[in-house]
Amino acid sequence: MKARYIFRLDDATSFMDTKKWKAIEEIFQQYGIVPIVAVTPDNRDPDLMYQELNPNFWKLIKEWEDKGWEIAMHGYQHLYHKVNRKELLFPYYDRSEFAGLTFKKQQEKIRKSIDVFRKNGFDPKVWVAPSHSFDSKTLRALLCETNINIVSDGIAQYPFYERSFYFIPQQLWSVKKKKYGVWTICLHPDTMSYEDIEQFKYDLSISQIYKAATSVKSLNLKKRQKSVNDKIYSFLFWRLYDIKPWLKRAKFFLIE
């Protein structure tokens, strides 16, 4: 099967840089891309406050949903506490909004998050954890409090089913052409410069991967277990991830 691509936009909040998001929206509209939008419903993270509170935020989210964009739950308030990354389901960072907390506390956060969504007319089916950071209790809380049964995360070459959830892997942060597999490209519009946005548009045009863009609804997810190739890819990904800091230090000392 030829490669297919999903695009995901992270950190949609009522304080996001609407001009940059509009620029990305126009590119997606031009190329017929229907992304996942990771929405934080009650952002309190000062690092995600790029402009004044947008009173029309939920109206904008509705406009995106009407275009077919997949509205995902991106945590609750995007506030972190320190954790041991080795205890996470996907060990990227030593921080989390959820992992490490009791089931009851995580359940409360999820309940408050879904209440905001539903108050504004949304019932998300996809979970995107802030900083990829969550644990098995987070998934239990999602099952108890929401209708979410899809996680946009994980390292594999194809979607897989695990812990009562469909996982759509998220492996890329820029445009890269692949021969096979399902690849999620994650972008953070707020932190992209306008030069980055233009480069992204150029890369889309040159690679033409937009022709292989798909959506959550079009994937026809099945209860598929990870294959041997998925497991090998995951193993190699995490080994490389773990040694990258050492490679950077070695390069620094060699240059010096």
Image (cartoon, helix red, strand yellow):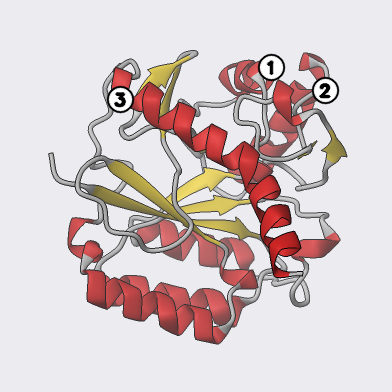
194 vs 13, nearest the viewer: 194
Mark 2, mark 3: which one is toward the viewer? 3
Residue drawn at point x = 23 percent, y = 48 percent: 4
Q: Residue 238 in the image: x percent, y percent?
A: 55, 33
Residue drawn at point x = 53 percent, y = 67 percent: 60
Q: Residue 121 in the image: x percent, y percent?
A: 54, 47
**Location of residue 107 by image quarter:** top right
Instruction: Tell me the SS state at disc 2.
Output: loop
Label disc, if present, on residue 137 of the rendered structure: 1
How crowded pointer 1 is (Cα within 10 Å; few <14, some 14-19, many 20+) is rated as: some
Residue drawn at point x = 72 percent, y = 21 percent: 87
Instruction: Tell me the SS state at disc 1.
Output: helix
Work out which quarter of the rendered image holds the N terminus and state it: top left
> Could you tell me the amino acid type at mark 1?
Lys
> Could you tell me the amino acid type at mark 3?
Asn
Question: Mark 1 and mark 2: span between their CA atoms?
Answer: 8 Å
Residue on which the image places disc 2:
101
Residue on which the image places disc 3:
229
